[in-house]
Amino acid sequence: MSRVTCIIVEDEPLARKVLEGYISRVPFLELTGAYEDAVDATDHLRNKPVDLMFLDIHLPVIKGIAFLKTLAHPPAVIITTAYHEYALEGYELNVVDYLLKPFEFERFLSAVNKIKNIKETEHPAAKDYLLINVQLKKVKVSFSEILYIESQKEYVKIVTSDHAYVTKMSTHEIERLLPEILFQRIHRSFIIALNKVRSFNSEMVEIHGNSIPVGRGYKHVLEKL
């Protein structure tokens, strides 16, 4: 059974504890973090993307709906709140389900089963492209076109032989979308297409006339070349 990784963003300790208990009862759910506010959750999502987020509406610092709107590539979201009036806005943001507190385990299980079904019907290995946001457009970039990907803080630059696309995404997020057999990270800021490497040594990889550094902790990747 495939695992569904998830985080909780909930400022009420009791509600957080209830969710943690429910999650522990579902074999395919794997909780990787629980946060009181959206700021801490943002760091988690940037560095360790997940499949699912349980998101409360009334949070300190930034409200749940406002937080969700800031995410360029959000995970699947299940809203958990005591306020039904936000349901319509939540569904407009493509949330998977809307749980009104207090909710029983059976209702929770019904919601997470939707995520499981979605994940099991996806076939990422069959896709041979990325669909990314570039300015106000959706751009399709085939895996076969990509030479390498470079981190630029909150953005990544996807470099092909004739173009460079900049999109708001972390290297961790885009790494999750790439087939491991074709792409490998060789530096904390660089992911390369293995079949595009022209030459390499222990310090540098050459791709299409570009010299890309090999990070100290990634030298084992050179064995795959």
Image (cartoon, rainbow, N blue to C red):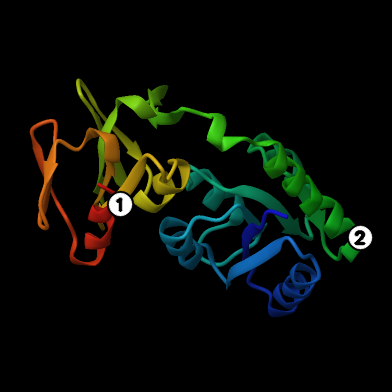
Disc 2 residue type? Glu
Residue 119 vs residue 127: left or right?
right
Q: Earlier in the sequence, mark 1 or mark 2?
A: 2
Residue 22 lies, in percent from the top left, at 80, 69
Q: Give the side of residue 96 with respect to residue 190, left or right.
A: right
Three-letter residue code for mark 1? Arg
Q: In this rendering, would 219 be left or right of 141?
A: left
Residue 60, x across and y down, in percent: 55, 67
Residue labelled with disc 1: 185
| Residue pointed to by mark 2 | 106
Please determine whether, in this image, residue 203 is positioned above or below residue 15: above
Residue drawn 77% across the image and 49% down it: 98
User: What distance separates the C-alpha of mark 1 from that of mark 2?
Assistant: 41 Å
Counting other residues with Cα less than 10 Å from the Cα at mark 1, is it few (<14), some (14-19), or many (20 or more)?
A: many
Instruction: Give above or below for 58 relative to 36.
Output: above
- Give the numbered dot on residue 40: none
